[in-house]
């Protein structure tokens, strides 16, 4: 199924998902990374009862920068149409 020239890509375009599943190694690395980040976040959160404003600001900056890095990575792998969709959803979630 060919997308029309000039038309934005949507999630229904079959060509986008043909090779986007990746190899099992990529999924193992991704899952491992998510688990490590969750453990790190839980461990850091458990050390203190309640973070002060500066610490909360640092954590927020860290997670937002990781989200924006993911956004840049999606540009290279999925194209600019889906990159804008990811960014819009991410910003909506942060709000």
Image (tube, rainbow, N blue to C red):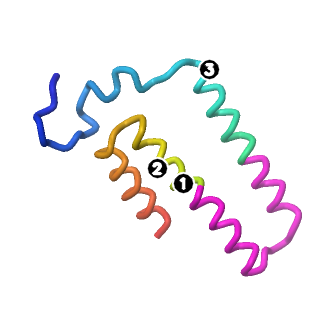
Could you tell me residue 87's position as x and y percent?
40, 56
| Residue farthest bottom in this picture | 53
Q: Which residue is mark 3?
A: 25
Q: Is residue 23 left or right of residue 16?
A: right
Do the residues bearing badges 2 and 1 touch, measured as CB atoms within 8 Å? yes
Residue located 62% across and 33% down the image: 30
Give residue 70's position: percent from left, percent from top. 52, 47
Which element is circle 2 on?
A: helix
Query: How many callouts does the rendering have?
Result: 3
Magenta stretch encompasses residue 79: no
Residue range corresponding to the magenta coloring: 38-65
Q: To which quarter of the image does residue 90 belong?
A: bottom left
* Circle number at residue 13: none
Q: Which residue is mark 2?
A: 71
Q: Quadrant of the N terminus?
A: top left
Measured from the top left, where is residue 91 in percent x and y?
Answer: 43, 63
Residue under numbered circle 1? 67
């Amino acid at each position: 199924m060919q997308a029309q020239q000039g038309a934005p890509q949507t999630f229904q375009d079959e060509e986008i998902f043909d090779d986007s599943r990746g190899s099992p190694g990529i999924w193992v690395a991704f899952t491992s990374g998510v688990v490590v980040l969750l453990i790190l976040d839980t461990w850091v959160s458990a050390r203190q009862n309640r973070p002060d404003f500066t610490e909360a600001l640092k954590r927020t900056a860290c997670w937002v920068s990781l989200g924006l890095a993911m956004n840049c990575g999606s540009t290279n792998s999925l194209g600019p149409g889906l990159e804008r969709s990811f960014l819009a959803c991410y910003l909506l979630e942060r709000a």
